[in-house]
Each structure stands twice: as C-alpha cells, then as structure tokens.
Amino acid sequence: MKTDLLLETLQNQLTALRAQATPLMGHATLKPRFDRQRFRTRSTLIRDYLAETQTYLDELRHAVENHQQEQVVWLAEHLTEQITALHREIAAWPLRVWDSPSPGPGKWQRKRLENQEFERRLFEMKREREMRLNAAETLEEQQLLMREITALEGRMVRCRQALEDIERVIERLTR
C-alpha cells in the first residue's frame, strides 16, 4: 500500500513539474543543465529531462510489480533526486537573464558581436602589455607584465570558447 502511495505521489509531482515547465519545454540551452549522475541525457531541452524522469518512474512501477526490492529503493531515491533537481532548475530559470526562454537568432547575433568586441579589446590589451614588456627595464616590472599577459591569454581562451558555444547555438537556431 505504501508503494502505491509513493508511485502516485511521484507521478503527481512529475505532472506538476511538467505543467510548471510548459513555457520552457522547447527552449535549448548552451550546455546540458545536469551532470551524468543525475540524468543520462545530454540534451539541452527540459522536456528531455522530464521524459527521462517519466521513464524511471515507469521502471519503478515495473520493479514494484516484480517485487525487486533493491531496484525499487534505488529507483525511488534516484527519482526523488531527479524531481528535486528539476524543481530547482525550473525555479531558477527566471534568474538566468542570459539564458531566458525563447531566444531568437537576433539575441545570439548580438551576443556574438559583444563577445567579438570583447575578444578584440583583450587582444589589444595583450599587445599593449607585450610592447611594454619589451621596453621594461626592471625584473619586477617584467614579471608583473608577464603575469598580466598570462591572465589576458586565459581570458582570451575563455572568450574564444564562449564564441564557439554561441556559434553552435546560432547554427542550431538557423537550421
């Protein structure tokens, strides 16, 4: 009897989650939202995470019918963790201004231009530091400039990665 109540509660929670996530169902994100321990899917769509959770719930029902106690315990715990994670994700979604629902290609084009401008400024800053390094007279000044150049190179790598991510999103949106 307890398992029937558990199954009904989990199904009700999943149904409520699906209703809350309706405005976000078709929205793709840059990267998967959850780690591999929580969800197998690498999708960027919330509906795919909900579908995986429903699959686990169906597996739990099957395990209950076949009296597979260990499987029931593991699946119930895993489902609870998935539902909790989905609740948090849906609640936090409005806080992600950079990743708000229904981004059009125009938004991503603007983000690409902003990042390209940022990359250009980083390159100019690095070039300026390199010129100062060539003219530096003291070891202390040279070390400081080398640290700055190294930091700028790291920022440029992250900027390039962000640009590649944006390019992939634009490509997906314009297919």
Image (cartoon, rainbow, N blue to C red):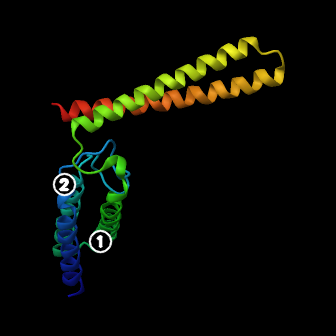
Answer with the quarter of the image where residue 87 lies: bottom left
Work out which residue is located at the far bottom of the displayed protein and give it: 1
Q: Which residue is mark 1?
A: 76
**Type of amino acid under label 1:** Ala
Disc 2 marks which amino acid?
Answer: Met
Asked if 163 appears above or below 19 in the picture, the reply is above
Q: Quadrant of the C terminus?
A: top left
Q: Quadrant of residue 151?
A: top right
Circle on res. 145:
none
How far across and how far down the image is residue 146, in percent?
70, 23
Tell whether label 1 touches label 2 (CB within 8 Å).
no
Instruction: Give the structural element (helix, strand or loop) at label 2.
Output: loop
Q: Quadrant of the N terminus?
A: bottom left
Residue on which the image places disc 2:
25
Tell me how far mark 2 sits from mark 1, CA to CA. 25 Å
Q: Residues within 10 Å of mark 1 (few under 14, many from 20)?
A: many
- Is residue 159 left or right of 31 when viewed as pictured? right
Q: Is residue 55 above or below residue 134?
A: below
Question: Could you tell whether 111 is left or right of 28 in the image?
Answer: right
> Dot 2: within a 10 Å radius of its alpha carbon, few (fewer than 14), some, or many (20 or more) residues?
some
Secondary structure of residue under mark 1: helix
Tally the numbered discs: 2
**Residue at 50% of width from left, 28% of height from top?**
157
Q: Residue at x 47, y 22 (%)?
A: 120
Rendered location of residue 79, percent (x, y): 29, 67
Residue 132 in the image: x percent, y percent? 70, 16
From the viewer's perspective, is residue 19 above or below residue 175? below
Return the x and y of residue 106 as percentages of the image width and height: 24, 35
